[in-house]
Structure formats: structure tokens, C-alpha cells
Image (cartoon, helix red, strand yellow):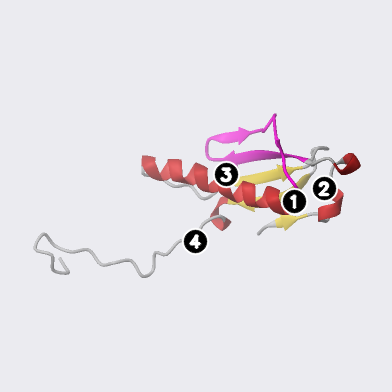
Amino acid sequence: MQIIVGDRQRAMGVGGAMPHFYFHVSNGTGFVRDEEGRELADVGEARERALHDIRSILSEEIKGGVVDLRGRLDVADGSGNVIVAIPFEEAVELHVEDAVPPTGDDGREGP
């Protein structure tokens, strides 16, 4: 479930400046607060950046052989209010039901 609070205008910076967003991660290794944040055009761009960040985290997990989809990335505005929350499982599409059946050493389906 993605949660978007407010609208794009509310997230705009003061005087037309680009708004600042913070990307906080909660997952199996704990909670990581983004202390620096990023200036982005709007909430939509922040959401896309959050999806990219989640996919980057998961790609590193894949290299280690274990993927934990129980995490979440919260996007907060400059006041610290969470305006978008994206569970890791919503950042990827998994296809497992149609997995290719295992083959034997001779290339035939099997055991």
C-alpha cells in the first residue's frame, strides 16, 4: 500500500525553491534516517527516487542470495512529515508461479 498525504503543491518549497525530501529506510537490518535528503521537483519525483532506492537495496541483497521484502521506505518533507510510504514489496514485480521446471543433467525435465 502506498500512502501519499497531501498534494504536490503542499510539498513545494518556499518562494518557488525546490523542496527537500528525506528518504528513511526500515528493514531487517534496522532503521536508517536520511540526514541529508535531496532537493527534487515534487512528490512525484520523490516517489520515483524512492522506488529507485528500494530497487538498489534489493539488488544488493540479491547479490548476497537473500531478498527481504519486509522493508519500507518513507519519504519525509522538510518538516519531517512522512508524505509517501512505500513497502519494498511494491517496488518489484515477482514471477514465481510460472517458474521453469528443474532439468536433470541430461537436459531433460526431471527428476
Q: Residues within 10 Å of mark 3 (few under 14, many from 20)?
A: some
Q: Position of residue 1 (x, y in %)?
A: 65, 59
Q: Find disc 4 in the rendering and name its residue.
A: 93
Instruction: Using the numbered discs, state the Cα–Cα distance from disc 1 to disc 2 in whole angstroms.
Output: 7 Å
Question: Observer-nearest residue: 58 or 102?
Answer: 58
Mark seen at residue 53: 3
Is residue 67 found left or right of 33 in the rendered image?
Answer: left
Q: Residue at x 79, y 38 (%)?
A: 80
Q: Nearer the viewer, residue 46 or 28?
A: 46
Measure the C-alpha gap from mark 2 to mark 4. 29 Å
Disc 3 vs disc 2: Cβ atoms closer than 8 Å?
A: no
Would you identify the image quadrant in which residue 8 lies? Answer: bottom right
Residue name at image x 69 percent, y 50 percent: 45
Disc 2 designates what residue?
Answer: 11
Query: For the residues marked 3 and 2, what is the alpha-carbon distance in whole angstroms?
Result: 20 Å
Could you tell me the amino acid type at mark 1?
A: Val
Neighbourhood count class around disc 4 (C-alpha, 10 Å): few under 14, some 14–19, many 20 upward? few
For disc 1, the marked residue is 43
In the drawing, what numbered circle is on residue 72? none
Please report contact status of discs 1 and 2: CB closer than 8 Å, yes or no. Answer: yes
For residue 92, side relative to residue 84 (left or right): left
Q: Is residue 15 left or right of residue 3?
A: right
Residues in magenta, as a range: 20-42
Q: Earlier in the sequence, mark 4 or mark 3?
A: 3
Q: Earlier in the sequence, mark 1 or mark 2?
A: 2
**Residue at 80% across, 54% down:** 5
